Image: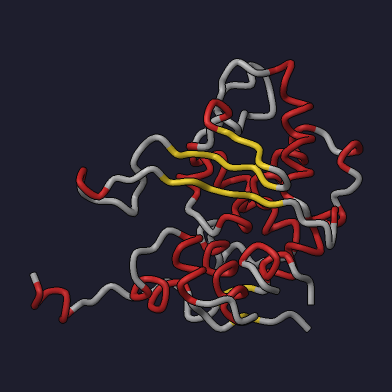
Amino acid sequence: MKGLLQKDPPLPRYSKTWDLNIVLRYLKKLWPLSSLNLFQLTMRLAMLLSLCSGKRGQNLHLLDLNFMVRQGDRVKFDLRVPVKNYGKASDVKLQTIEFMEYPHDKELCPVTTLNRYLEVTKPLRMSPKLFLISMKPYRRASRATIARWVKTVMENAGVDTSVYKPHSARSATVSKAASLGIPTDVILSRAGWKSDNCFAMYYLKPIEVDGGSDFQSAVLQLD
């Protein structure tokens, strides 16, 4: 098997990544929140949480209101089931995804958008999972649906989705954080990687540029 890997090694899909500012500028156009329909609000929230968490789409799919806790200026979700990062039962640990208020720009604040989404979906809810499809019967959204929402935002913003797939949002996020000086150990902890090998090989890319003190602030900072 080692010989096969050497003969045909797994290679990264991308040699570079897209500029996060393209999507951030588009998200700022989806304001005020009261003017958005449920589909627009859902897509906006999915993209913001994807960017601010640095996690896989699988993690967004698992967000559950039963395990959501508010602590001051932040909202935390405990993940109660194993995710891809842990391959053995002995490796399984309780993971927490945290989102903070972003007072520098309310139009990009994930907590503000989350609060509005919870307000709008409260009378529609039949599931404790955070993300619901935006039409009747408003059941839990699948992982594929969440990925389509992220792709739609990318496409509407002007990212070339014939080249970049929804999962590339993860690379765009961590690459921007790294370019702004966020320490590698902070990025690894936020994104859920055990070592920097995967990060360096598959996700840290030069940013294809169009003509802070913490991970989330760095990601949301508009140049």
* Figure check: 90 above or below 155: above
Find residue 140 and report its horizontal and vertical position in percent: 55, 26
Q: Is residue 93 above or below residue 202?
A: above
Q: Quadrant of residue 211?
A: bottom right
Rendered residue at 68%/70% (across/down): 218
Q: Residue at x 86, y 41 (%)?
A: 33
- Residue drawn at 91 percent across, 45 percent down: 32
Task: Check the picture and name the quadrant holding the N terminus.
Answer: bottom left
Q: Position of residue 8 (x, y in %)?
A: 20, 77
Q: Nearer the viewer, residue 147 or 95?
A: 95
Q: Give left or right: position of 70 versus 37.
A: left
Judge whether 176 appears above or below 92 on screen.
below
* Position of residue 160 measured from the top left corner of the image (x, y, whole percent): 64, 67
Quarter residue 41 falls in: top right
Relative to residue 169, is residue 192 drawn left or right? left
Quadrant (top left, top right, bottom left, bottom right) of the C terminus: bottom right
Percent of width and height locating residue 154? 67, 58
Q: Is residue 215 shown left or right of residue 73?
A: left
Point 41% across, 78% down: residue:
200
Compared across the picture, whether 199 is left or right of 75 comes to left
Instruction: List the single residue furthest toward the front.
Output: 72
Count of numbered labels shown in the rendering? 0
Query: Vertical placement of 190 versus 180: above or below?
Result: above
Q: Nearer the viewer, residue 151 or 81?
A: 81
